[in-house]
Every structure is written in C-alpha cells, then in structure tokens.
Image (tube, rainbow, N blue to C red):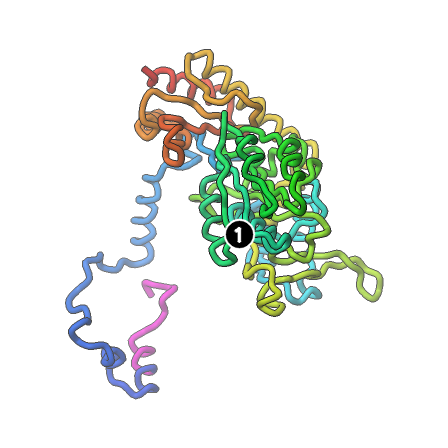
Amino acid sequence: MEFRYLPMTETDKKEMLDVIGVQHSDELFLDIPESIRFNGDLEIKEPKNEFQLMKELTELAEKNVHLKSHTSFLGAGVYDHYIPSIVDHVISRSEFYTAYTPYQPEISQGELQAIFEFQTMICELTGMDVANSSMYDGGTALAEAVNLSAGQTKKKKVLVSKAIHPESLAVIHSYVKGPGVEVVEIDHKDGRTDLEQLEREIDEDTASVVVQYPNFFGQIEPLEQVRAIVDTQKKAMMITSSNPLALGYLTPPGEFGADIVVGDAQVFGIPAQYGGPHCGYFATTKKLMRKVPGRLVGQTVDEEGRRGFVLTLQAREQHIRRDKATSNICSNQALNALASSVAMSSLGKQGLKKMSWMNIQKAAYMKKQLQESGIEVVFDGAFFNEIVVKLDRDVKEFNRMLLDHGIIGGYDLGEVDERLKNCMLVAVTEIRTKEEIDTFVKEVGDLHV
C-alpha cells in the first residue's frame, strides 16, 4: 500500500456508505447549494507515494537555514544554548513521550516526580516559595500573572515596562480585555525602565508593576529600586519576567521582594525549533499559592510511609466552579518541563552557574571587540548575554549579507521601536566560540561603511 497512514480502501468506503444508506459520497453534500459548491480540480500537485513525498520534503528542508548550518547571534527570547545529550534520551522514553495529565497518581509517579523536580528547581532559581507545573510559554505566564495581581488586589490598573519582550506585552493586552484591566506602558530610558515615569504613574489604583530581568535589550533592571517604588502603594505587587539561566548568576528576584516571577524555560534543554513549543514557569509566594494558574504537584507518603507524588492543587476551570477558577489554562508543557529538568539536573548547580557566567563573559567580549572596531554599542548599563548594536543601514539588509557569510544575525529592533531604527539586538550564548565572535565582528566591520 502506498500510503501506510491512510489505509482506507474503496471497499471500506463502500461498506460505510452502505451502512448509512447512500450510493456515493457526493450525496453527503446535497444540502449544500450547487451554486456555491466548487466545480473542477484544485490546483495542487498529484499525490505521491510515501517514498517520493519524503524525498521531495527532504529536498525542501535542506534549503532551510538552521542552527547546525549557520552560526547564530539571534536571541530576542529564543536562544541557541547547549543541550546535554541525555535530554533527548530521557524525554524519548515512551512513558514520558506519550504521557498525558497524571490524574491517577498510582500509575503516574515518574511523570509526577519529574514535574515536582521542575517546580523545585524553579523555586531555587527564582528565590520564590512555590512554582507551578509549567505553562505554555513565558508570554502567557506573564499575562496570567497580570490578571492574578488584578484579581488579588481588586485593582484594575497595571504598569508594564516597555522594556519587556514586545510579544509578551501584546499577550498582556489580549489577556486583560476579559477582566477589564487597564495597561499603562512605562517607557524605557537608556535601555532600562524609566523609573521617574514609573514613580509618576503609580497610584492607589495600581495592582502591579511588571518588569523584565534581564530585560528585552539584555540590560539588568534595578529591582531594588523598582521594589521601593512599588512599596509606596499599599497592596501593589511586583511582577518580574526572568530568563532562568541568568538567575544562575544574578541575584534572584525573590531576594528583591518580587511577588510573582515568571519566564520561559526554553534556555534549558529545549531547542529553538521555529519559536516553539516552549515551557513557561510561574513562581510566587506561599500567600498566593491558591491563586496560581494551572496546577501544583506535591510530595507526600502513602499509607505504608513510602514517598509519593500527587496533584496537590488544581485551581482551574476543569476542576472547580468556573467563577472560582483562577485561570482557564487547562494543560501544561510536561514534556518540555521534563526536558528542562533533565538539563538542569545534568548541569548541576555549579555547571548552571558556570554556563550563566560564560554568557556574561562572552557577551562582554563581543561588546569590547565591536567597540574597538568602531561599531556603536547603544546602551552602557550592566547586561547579561544580549547587546544592542547601531548599524549604518537597515538591519534586514545587514542580515541578508551576513547570511551569505554563514551567520544568522540579530533581531531588528526597528520593528518594535522607531527610536531604535537600524539597531540590532545581538545574543551571545555559552556555545559561541571566540573564533565565531571574532568572525561576526569582522564581517560587521567590513559591511559597516
């Protein structure tokens, strides 16, 4: 048979039509007026057998530019990091790869323990009390945090830094339409949140302040100062979106008094893979535990005293009354959370800290080399692994030329901020070598007039 995944034969079709009492499949569409039916043949290729189809698709796929064929300096929320080989070995096991929601803990202990370990490691990185069993991605986790703050404080205004990821900002605007929360955008100044504007805008109606750490431009936000501003208003919360890899070296938001810390675990064990799927995390204080979207896995003992794991808290629509639910999130990213757990476990505490440190050092080396080559680096503040470079022409044109030299260039910031026209956001991760960085600097210098 040519199509092993389409096993239906003409005999099968005839038997089904006989059962429902029609002679031909066209009779199934008699209720649709003939005037609006399509007559003729679709302008598509003739079907091929499986071997021919795979050959054609492979030829098309080989035309793609990807992270194995080119050196990437593109970040902006999706990064090219080292993934330990053990990650694929573990997540490819059938008990994990095909697992669904672990409703029956007695037969889901492996899945539950993996999620529990993910929660534990996220709490250690963020400095928070509680983390849920993952969310779809960092953007939706941040929007959920905004809605939680409005529900908890009974206030309808949130102040959101424009130095967060622009896609996360767009997701927030979508999420707040339902509960009717007002979003006030706080501009950035010299690459970081404008604290003077934040002080002017915060008032007694403010539910929360949202910042990113490190922010979209790679700059380190002064969380201690942000917290001091938040504390001028009773009940107002500080929400921080954080790259968890950066937290392997930077002071965690929990130590600055953050109420909610969210982010994307893509940096641990999850390939870039065309921008998703990823794995969001959501961590908060014990006080807000029952308001956390999604679910929590807890550790307990059975009647014989043996260690075990269960779904402890599930404050979502599927499990409780709709009006009492904290969110309509009805699933999580268990497989990707497992990948992140395996990656973090294999790196270990010291390995994770070293990996984070290498991102900082290599990005600092890139900045130094660019400046010595006469290329302007826009912001001067402390940063993690991304820097903003000012070019002499359109970033898209620059990136097309870099591609000819085997390099995937950075993100065009002019797409999201007119003030940053001709500015490129460049990411340097731990797997970029000195030779690759030097080559990038040379090519940019040669192309820069």
- What range of the chain is rendered magenta? 1-15
Q: Position of residue 250 (x, y in %)?
A: 65, 31
* The quarter of the displayed image where residue 226 is located: top right
Task: Indicate whether 156 appears above or below 201.
Answer: below
Is residue 389 within the magenta segment? no
Q: Is residue 13 magenta?
A: yes
In the image, 184 versus 311, the foreground residue is: 184
Nearer to the camera, 293 or 118: 293
Question: Which residue in the protein does label 1 denote?
Answer: 136
Q: Is residue 412 visible to the viewer in this orientation of the structure?
A: no
* Residue 376 in the figure: left or right of residue 401: right
* Dot 1: element: loop
Q: Give the vertical position of 252 relative to 371 (above or below).
A: below
Left or right, 290 with reference to 42: right
Instruction: Sort mark 1 into few (<14), some (14-19) or many (20+) by Cα contacts within 10 Å.
Output: many
Residue occupying image coordinates x 53% and y 18%: 365
- Residue 8 in view, yes or no: yes
Amino acid under label 1?
Tyr
For this rendering, which residue is in front, 234 or 325? 234
Q: Quadrant of the N terminus?
A: bottom left
Q: Position of residue 56 (x, y in %)?
A: 29, 49
Q: Quadrant of residue 318?
A: bottom right
Q: In this orientation, which residue lies closer to the viewer: 247 or 404?
A: 247
Q: Residue at x 54, y 61 (%)?
A: 328
Q: Residue at x 67, y 39 (%)?
A: 231
The secondary structure that most of the magenta stretch takes on is loop
Residue 290: image location, x then y, percent: 68, 58
Q: Is residue 348 above or below residue 421?
A: below
Image point (63%, 52%), residue name: 153
Q: Quadrant of the C terminus?
A: top left
Residue 162: percent from the left, percent from the top? 48, 37
